[in-house]
Each structure stands twice: as structure tokens, then as C-alpha cells.
Amino acid sequence: MTDNRTIALVTGANKGIGFEAARQLADLGMTVLLAARDQRRCDEAAVVLRAADLDVHPIILDVTDPATIRAAAEQVAERTGRLDVLVNNTGISGGALHPPSAADLEIVREVFDTNVFGVLRVINAMLPLLKRSPAGHIVNVSSGVGSMGDMTDPDHYMGLTITRTAAEGAAIVVRLATLGPDGPTGGFFDDNGPVRW
């Protein structure tokens, strides 16, 4: 890996929005670390992107397994010495929406372990590497259901459907990952701008 390229790590990069974000970032000339928990799927994603002459490298990282996160951070430190962009894309839905009275607590624990604690684990492990970057970026990927304001608004909540492709969903991730130093920070954004919390 070359020192002069921007180094990005994308979790859940073997499929969907993560794969597309990795592809688009690599298309911009970045070196992209494709992080996924399954070695075979991670390698297959890398083969597809390398066939398009993109600079991508598979790396095993399970956001629910601290040992793989530590190992991934060590690999990044050894290979590049820094990290410029971290995209926390891995997430699970836990299935259909249920009222709290009908929630399966094991599924709720799994969702929180992946979507909340997993993000914190990865950020904490990668933060020393991001601090070595002249302008480190962290992009935490969510869906519209991450907005409490929208989800508690009956007018907005009704008819909530997914209408975009993975490539279209990845475009906002890439835009935020490539913002300049004067770009917004600490916000919740979609294609149209800020989203209410």
C-alpha cells in the first residue's frame, strides 16, 4: 500500500451499501480496506473490485468480536501507519418492527451489540490511527429509522419504504467521507442535508 493515498476502512464491505461505498471510495483513488467478518465473502468482494483495477485489501473484522477488531487495528498500523477514513457500515435490523411489549430481548441485545457497541468498539480501536491522519473522517452509516424525530412523527413514518439502490445509498457515505475540513461534523445527514435526531 502506498503512503500517499488516502486510506479508508469500510466495515460490512462485502455486500450492499458497504461494498458500493468501498467501490466508490476506491474509484476516487483511495486505498480501501474491505472489512467483513467472513473471510470467503471478504475475499470474493476484493476479487470483484480488483478486477476493476481498484486498490482494495480484505481484512477480517467482526464488530461483535473485540479480538478481530484489535487484530484489524494492528494490521492497519503495520500496513499503513494511519487511517484517514473510517466508515462504520455494519448493521443489522433485528427483523420486522415490533412494539416493545413484543420484543425478543435476545434480538434486541444482538442489534445493540452490533449497531451501537460494535460501532464504539471499532471507533475506539481505530481512533489512534485516525489521529495520525492530517484530516481523519468517521462516517457512521444509519437508515432513516435512526431518526427518533422522524420515527415518532406519524406523517413521516407512514409509507416508509426503501426506494434507492445500494450505489445510491453509498453516495451520501462517500460525500461525507470526502468532506473538506470546513464540512459539517457531528450531524445526521441524508441526500437532502441534515436530518433531525
Image (spheres, rainbow, N blue to C red):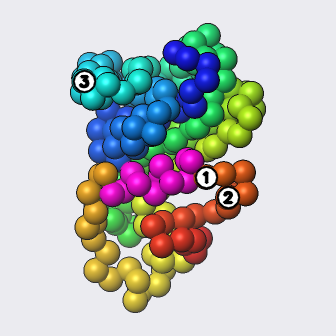
- How far apart in space, not on screen, are marks 2 and 1 (Cα)? 6 Å
Residue 91 in sight in this render: yes
Residue 110 % position (x, y):
43, 43
Q: Secondary structure at mark 3?
A: helix
74 up-or-down from 194: above or below: above
Task: Read off the residue under disc 1.
Answer: 179
Please determine whether, in this image, residue 79 is positioned above or below residue 7.
above
Q: What whole-number distance in Å separates the C-alpha atoms at marks 2 and 3?
A: 33 Å
How far apart are the alpha carbons under marks 3 and 1?
Answer: 28 Å
Specify whether residue 112 is in view.
no
Q: Residue at x 68, y 39 (%)?
A: 136
Whole-percent x, y for residue 27 in the image: 39, 38
Q: Name the residue at 55% across, 17% down.
A: 2
Q: How many marks?
A: 3
Point out residue 175 in the picture as x, y percentages from the top left corner. Answer: 51, 54
The residue at which mark 3 appears reads as 51
Query: Which span of residues is magenta-colored?
Result: 168-178
Identify the residue at image location x=48%, y=77%.
150
Residue 3 at x, y percent in the picture: 61, 19
| The C terminus sits in image quarter | bottom right
Q: Secondary structure at mark 2?
A: loop
Q: Are marks 2 and 1 in contact (CB under 8 Å)?
A: yes
Do the CB atoms of the residues marked 3 and 1 lie less than 8 Å apart? no
Residue 10 vertical position relative to residue 174 in the rendered view, above or below: above
Q: What amino acid type should be assigned to the residue bearing mark 1?
A: Leu
Q: Amino acid at mark 3?
A: Ala
Say the numbered circle drawn on residue 183. 2
